[in-house]
């Protein structure tokens, strides 16, 4: 078994034509999610610089909300 065999096996899974069909029916713009994530990282960074646990926690909460809570709420609502 050469070192190239595992790469050839993985290449089968990386072929875009073998994945699921793209339906394109994502009706919600991702911009608010990305803006919220960016704001969360910015606030969290400022919190680390200022050594403010409150700001860090708020930044983490924004990131969690944009990546988990808001998409989950939208999925349940639809």
Image (cartoon, helix red, strand yellow):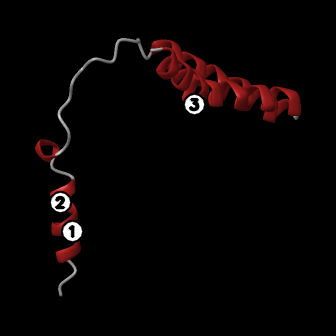
**Labels 1 & 2 near each other (Cβ < 8 A):** yes
Percent position (x, y) of residue 30?
Answer: 43, 17
Instruction: For mark 2, give the secondary structure.
Output: helix
Instruction: For mark 1, give the secondary structure.
Output: helix
Q: Quadrant of the C terminus?
A: top left
Residue sitting at the far left: 17
How far apart marks 3 and 2 lie (CA) works out to 30 Å
Q: Residues within 10 Å of mark 3 (few under 14, many from 20)?
A: few
Q: Quadrant of the N terminus?
A: bottom left
Is 67 in front, or is 75?
Answer: 75
Residue at the spot 64% in from the left edge and 31% down from the top edge = 64
> Depth-wise, is mark 3 or mark 2 nearer the camera?
3
Is 11 in front, or is 39?
Answer: 11
Q: Residues within 10 Å of mark 1 (few under 14, many from 20)?
A: few
Percent position (x, y) of residue 61?
Answer: 72, 28
How far apart marks 3 and 1 lie (CA) works out to 33 Å
- Residue at the disc numbered 1: 7
Q: Is residue 77 left or right of residue 27?
A: right
Residue 69's image quarter?
A: top right
Disc on res. 68: 3
Mark 3 or 2, nearer chain start: 2
Percent position (x, y) of residue 62?
Answer: 67, 24
Percent position (x, y) of residue 72?
Answer: 54, 26
Residue 24's image quarter?
A: top left
Is 54 in front, or is 61?
Answer: 61
Instruction: For mark 3, give the secondary structure.
Output: helix
**Labels 3 & 2 near each other (Cβ < 8 A):** no
Residue sitting at the far bottom: 1
**Position of 51 relative to 78 (above/below):** below
- Residue at the disc numbered 2: 11
């Amino acid at each position: 078994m050469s070192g190239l065999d595992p790469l050839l096996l993985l290449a089968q899974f990386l072929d875009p034509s073998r994945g699921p069909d793209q339906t394109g029916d994502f009706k919600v713009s991702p911009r608010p999610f990305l803006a919220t994530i960016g704001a969360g990282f910015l606030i969290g960074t400022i919190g680390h610089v200022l050594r403010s646990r409150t700001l860090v926690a708020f930044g983490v909460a924004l990131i969690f909300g944009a990546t988990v809570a808001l998409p989950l709420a939208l999925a349940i609502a639809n």
